[in-house]
Each structure stands twice: as structure tokens, then as C-alpha cells.
């Protein structure tokens, strides 16, 4: 499957921009709630304003993380891979299980778990620090990796690295 990694990178950036907007809107709403005159506590047990301020701070922190992730992705070098190339950062890896069902993962620097849809194909961003990312780094087409633990684990063969 020939998917354009520049397009995938743009999808990741678009998703992060959307998530940033959601966090920004939520932070503004929580901040407004924390400072609204109706939420001024009458006694020490009324904590709505305090809780809203904690929420606003958490959302602002997450927004900062997303901005940093966007900058990291904007600077990401997309490498080309051949059949003998080991998996590393910016690899798009196609994995197939014993039933020939495939999964695609993109090795990104941050924001592991983020999912994007590229022309009807779900691609999951994983980082080299994740368990699967650690297993994939340095592997090549034909190698087998295990996803999951215990009885719920499955083996996948690396069928393509691009």
C-alpha cells in the first residue's frame, strides 16, 4: 500500500490543531467558570471555582504540550525506507497477523496513540518509547513482533516499511 507520508504528517498536524482548539476552548470555559461571580464560594465547602481553576490549568498545560508536539512534527524529517531498511523514526510500518489482517503504525516522536484516517486506512502513531515502538525499532521486513501481553497477545509480521 503506497500512502504518502507527507499527507499522513499533515493529517497528524491537523488532528493536533483540532485537539489544541478543543483544549483552548475548554480552558477558556473553565477559566470563565472559575472567575464567574456566581461561583464565588460562600463557605469553605463550596469548591466549584477552585475545581474549575484546576481544570483550566490542566487544559492550558495540555494545550502547551500539543503546541510543542506540533512544532516537533513540523520539524520531523521523513526518511525513505527500502525493504532492507531498519525501522526508525518516521517509518510507516504495515503489520500483518496470522489471518493476514493488517495494521499500520507511524513511528512518531510524540503523541503516541493518536489515530488518523488516511484514505480509509487507520494509522496509529506510536513512539519509540512505547512497548511496540521499542520492539519495532531496528527490525526489518519479515521480522515478527508481539503486540499485547499474556493470552491476549498476538504476533504480527512486518510486511512493509516505507
Image (cartoon, rainbow, N blue to C red):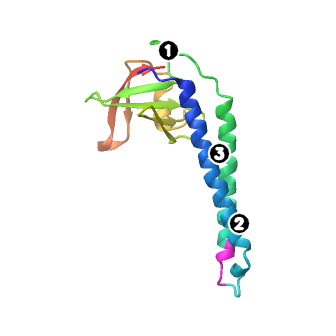
- Give the Cα separation between the discs numbered 1 and 2: 49 Å
Identity of the residue drawn at 38% across and 40% down: 148
Identity of the residue drawn at 63% across and 43% down: 17
Mark 3 or mark 2, which has the lower sequence index?
A: 2
**83 in relation to 34, above or below:** above
Identity of the residue drawn at 66% across and 66% down: 30
Q: Secondary structure at mark 2?
A: helix
Q: Looking at the rendering, in which quadrant would you find the N terminus?
A: top left
Q: Is residue 7 left or right of residue 101?
A: right
**91 in relation to 39, above or below:** above
**49 in relation to 1, above or below:** below
Residue 112: give x, y in percent of width and height. Answer: 53, 40
Residue 9: give x, y in percent of width and height. Answer: 57, 30
Residue 94 inside the magenta-drawn segment:
no
Tag of residue 31 = 2
Pointer 3 local density, CA inside 10 Å: few below 14, some 14–19, many at least 20: many
Residue nearer the viewer, 61 or 149? 61
Which residue is most to the front? 119
Which residue is most to the bottom? 42
- Label 3, on which residue? 66
- Give the Cα separation between the discs numbered 1 and 3: 31 Å
Span highlighted in magenta in the image: 45-50
Mark 1 or mark 2, which has the lower sequence index?
A: 2
Amino acid at each position: 500500500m503506497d500512502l504518502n507520508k507527507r499527507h499522513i504528517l499533515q493529517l497528524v498536524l491537523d488532528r493536533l490543531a483540532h485537539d489544541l482548539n478543543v483544549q483552548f476552548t475548554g480552558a477558556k470555559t473553565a477559566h470563565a467558570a472559575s472567575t464567574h461571580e456566581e461561583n464565588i464560594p460562600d463557605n469553605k465547602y463550596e469548591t466549584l471555582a477552585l475545581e474549575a481553576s484546576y481544570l483550566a490549568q490542566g487544559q492550558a498545560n495540555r494545550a502547551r504540550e500539543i503546541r510543542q508536539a506540533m512544532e516537533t512534527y513540523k520539524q520531523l524529517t521523513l526518511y525513505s525506507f527500502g525493504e532492507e531498511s531498519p525501522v526508525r523514526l518516521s517509518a510507516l510500518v504495515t503489520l500483518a497477523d496470522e489471518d493476514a489482517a493488517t495494521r499500520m503504525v507511524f513511528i512518531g516522536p510524540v503523541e503516541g496513540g493518536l489515530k488518523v484516517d488516511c484514505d480509509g486506512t487507520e494509522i496509529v502513531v506510536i513512539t519509540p518509547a512505547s512497548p511496540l515502538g521499542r520492539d519495532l525499532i531496528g527490525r526489518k521486513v519479515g521480522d515478527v513482533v508481539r503486540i499485547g501481553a499474556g493470552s491476549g497477545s498476538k504476533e504480527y509480521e512486518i510486511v512493509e516499511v516505507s
